[in-house]
Image (spheres, rainbow, N blue to C red):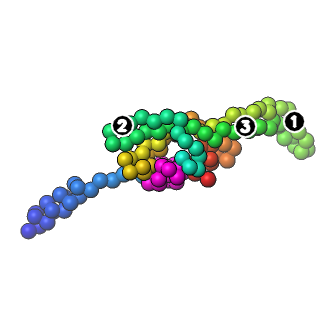
Amino acid sequence: MNLTLMAAFALALAGCTTTAAPKNEVETRWIGQQAGAFFAKFGPPAGDAAAGNATTYTWRGGHKTRTVPATYETLPDGKRGKLLTRARTEYLRCEVQLTVSGDYIIRGIRTIVDRPTAGGKSYCAEFLAGA
């Protein structure tokens, strides 16, 4: 009896499938959502490719110019010392690939182009998940 019960449990467990847990904020926000909602919010995809019963869309956007100020050494008297890093301009953008199932649900999202921000988050996470 115990052996039969264990075999039934093993068969039931073998039939289960799991999905990968989201790895970042963008995946947490968008996996399982309608692709139409993503494209309505951020604009149309730059390209697409069919892959079996799914479609992979490439999306590019979030273009932004950010000025990063110069940093200086702080002297003991509170005054500004020598230049540590020059001021610079950064050009930010985000590019992701969305894997969308036949029912137009986002099943996967992979970041292709990204940059870290001053707060430690990636620009794509800030732009796509924070929206």
Q: How far across and down, in percent of the image, does residue 56 sit?
A: 43, 39
**Front residue of 22 and 47:** 47
Taking the view exactly as shown, the residue that stands out farthest to the bottom is 1
Q: Residue at x 74, y 38 (%)?
A: 66
Per the image, the residue denoted by label 2 is 51
**Front residue of 113 and 122:** 113
Label 3–label 1 contact, CB within 8 A: no
Which mark's residue is nearer the viewer, 3 or 1?
3
Q: Secondary structure at mark 3?
A: strand
| On screen, residue 93 above or below 3 | above
Q: Is residue 31 magenta?
A: yes
> The N terminus appears in which quarter of the rendering?
bottom left
| Earlier-in-chain disc, 3 versus 1 | 3
Per the image, the residue denoted by label 3 is 65
Q: How far across and down, in percent of the image, does residue 113 sit?
A: 56, 35
Per the image, the residue denoted by label 1 is 81
Q: Residue at x 47, y 54 (%)?
A: 33
Q: Is residue 13 left or right of residue 90?
A: left
Tell me the CA gap for discs 2 and 1. Answer: 57 Å
What's under tag 1, amino acid-wise? Answer: Gly
**Front residue of 50 and 118:** 50
Q: Secondary structure at mark 1?
A: strand
What's under tag 3, amino acid-wise? Answer: Thr
Provide the residue span drawn in magenta.
23-38
Taking the view exactly as shown, the residue that stands out farthest to the left is 1
Which mark's residue is nearer the viewer, 2 or 1?
2
| Earlier-in-chain disc, 2 versus 1 | 2
Q: Residue at x 61, y 39 (%)?
A: 61
Q: Quadrant of residue 115?
A: top right
Q: Main secondary structure of the magenta part?
A: helix
| Earlier-in-chain disc, 3 versus 2 | 2
